[in-house]
Image (tube, grey):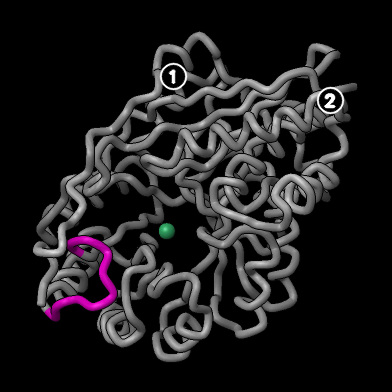
């Protein structure tokens, strides 16, 4: 079997989140073979960077046509060593990850088995998810509490949110720290002790702020404290982990095993959240998770992707990881994701069943993809120097 063609679809998610004008476009990759079998993959995207990622897919396509889709590991090595001359970037790894998933989908379809059965087999029957994307427009602690209550009523037992106001800055006011703590407190009071609260910090803070505000949040027993400091400084993260009694998470901006080495060696995180759509793909996520095992680090794949292919690829890997705990589900992406999927996945009581169909277990409807075309988001109100504080 040979790879015959690669097509891409940029599809508007329709999702709007607070502070993220226009949501994002998803990037789907369809790899076709000379035997008529095709595979789907999804590349991670970021607002205003989606077209450059799509460009990377098309540059790689030239080198893939005519190759055997079964040689997945060699493909990822070739892209890094030869195509990219050992210069990584987010865009490169997003494109590579999308293609890699599609190759697994092809292999699974050809062999008639779900992908997880080719990666060691099932370690669980269903995949726990946490809700994200549910608090767009919330401002006061009361509004956060109200929206949290609504999403728990839909059956989710774990919620993630970024409680911090304003743009991402290293140094913040005490009143912003207090507002974040008050939002977390209000949500905890509204949903009770049984619901897990995952605190997202988005790499915002300098360690002094991250430690102080983390300690203030301890009383609300968060499930985790995600990326409290910029991801590139692993010792700074280890410093936060030493001083805050909440499990610390990093990984969504780290690509390939190489980037995780220092996290484990320095014992900087309790949980890692690599993303199957940007870390290097299905096998790379599996290998990163295997590295984490002997360090007693749990894995919770990040998934700011559609709840179609990106989630399906995540589910296949999560099924076979002994150290998997939970993954991400964007509730505001579900409507369009379901509309473009032939056989959408369903969340029931906060869990997704592992599909038993060959490949990734999810097929896209190309006519439906064309009905949700690329959307150029309006220009964002990014700050000028005079908007910054003292
Ligand atoms: Mg995050």
Contact between labelled residues 2 and 1, with CB atoms less than 8 Å apart: no
Q: How many angstroms separate mark 1 from mark 2 (CA)? A: 26 Å
Identify which residue, 134 or 31, lies in the foreground: 31
Residue 151 is drawn in which quadrant? top left
Crowdedness of circle 2 by 10 Å Cα count: few (<14), some, many (20+)?
Answer: few
Q: Quadrant of the C terminus?
A: bottom left
Residue 182, visible in the rendered structure: yes
Q: Which residue is drawn at 57% across and 62% down?
A: 254
Name the spot of residue 349 as percent of width and height, x first: 45, 43
Q: Residue at x 57, y 20 (%)?
A: 364
Q: Does residue 372 show up magenta in the picture?
A: no
In screen coordinates, is 260 left or right of 308? Answer: right
Q: Which residue is drawn at 58% across and 44% down?
A: 94
Q: Give the range drawn in magenta.
A: 165-174
Identify which residue, 137 or 323, lies in the foreground: 137
Residue highlighted by disc 2? 112
Q: Is mark 1 on a helix, strand or loop?
A: helix
Work out whether mark 1 precedes mark 2 in sequence or the reverse, and give the earlier one: 2
Residue highlighted by disc 1? 339
In screen coordinates, is 109 left or right of 182? Answer: right
Look at the magenta stretch and give its main secondary structure.
Answer: loop
Name the spot of residue 158 as percent of width and height, x first: 40, 56
Residue 349, visible in the rendered structure: no
Q: In the displayed image of the protein, which residue is found farthest to the top?
A: 367
Q: Quadrant of the N terminus?
A: top right
Name the spot of residue 246 as percent of width and height, x first: 42, 79
Tell which quarter ligand 1 is in.
bottom left
């Amino acid at each position: 079997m040979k790879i015959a063609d690669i097509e891409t679809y940029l599809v508007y998610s329709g999702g709007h989140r607070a502070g993220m004008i226009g949501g994002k476009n998803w990037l789907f990759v369809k790899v076709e073979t000379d035997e008529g079998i095709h595979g789907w993959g999804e590349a991670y995207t970021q607002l205003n960077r989606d077209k450059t990622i799509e460009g990377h897919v098309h540059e790689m396509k030239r080198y893939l046509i005519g190759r055997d889709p079964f040689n997945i590991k060699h493909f990822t090595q070739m892209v890094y060593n030869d195509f990219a001359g050992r210069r990584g970037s987010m865009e490169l790894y997003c494109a590579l990850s999308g293609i890699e998933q599609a190759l697994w989908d092809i292999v699974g379809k050809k062999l008639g088995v779900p992908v997880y059965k080719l990666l060691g087999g099932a370690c669980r029957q269903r995949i726990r998810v946490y809700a994200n994307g549910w608090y767009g427009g919330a401002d006061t602690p009361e509004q956060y509490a109200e929206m949290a209550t609504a999403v728990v009523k839909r059956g989710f037992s774990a919620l993630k949110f970024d409680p911090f106001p304003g743009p991402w800055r290293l140094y913040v006011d005490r009143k912003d720290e207090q507002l974040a703590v008050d939002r977390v407190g209000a949500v905890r009071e509204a949903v009770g002790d049984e619901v897990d609260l995952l605190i997202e910090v988005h790499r915002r803070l300098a360690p002094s702020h991250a430690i102080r505000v983390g300690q203030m949040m301890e009383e609300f027993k968060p499930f985790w404290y995600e990326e409290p400091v910029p991801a590139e400084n692993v010792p700074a993260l280890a410093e936060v982990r030493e001083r805050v009694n909440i499990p610390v998470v990093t990984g969504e901006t780290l690509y390939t095993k190489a980037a995780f080495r220092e996290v484990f060696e320095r014992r900087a995180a309790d949980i890692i959240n690599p993303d199957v759509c940007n870390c290097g793909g299905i096998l790379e996520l599996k290998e990163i998770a295997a590295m984490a095992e002997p360090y007693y680090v749990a894995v919770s794949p990040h998934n700011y992707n559609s709840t179609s292919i990106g989630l399906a690829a995540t589910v296949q890997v999560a099924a076979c990881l002994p150290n998997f705990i939970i993954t991400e589900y964007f509730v505001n992406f579900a409507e369009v994701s379901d509309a473009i999927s032939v056989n959408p996945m369903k969340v029931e009581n906060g869990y997704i069943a592992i599909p038993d169909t060959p490949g990734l277990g999810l097929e896209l409807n190309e006519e439906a993809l064309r009905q949700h075309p690329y959307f150029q988001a309006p220009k964002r109100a990014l700050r000028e120097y005079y908007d910054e504080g003292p």
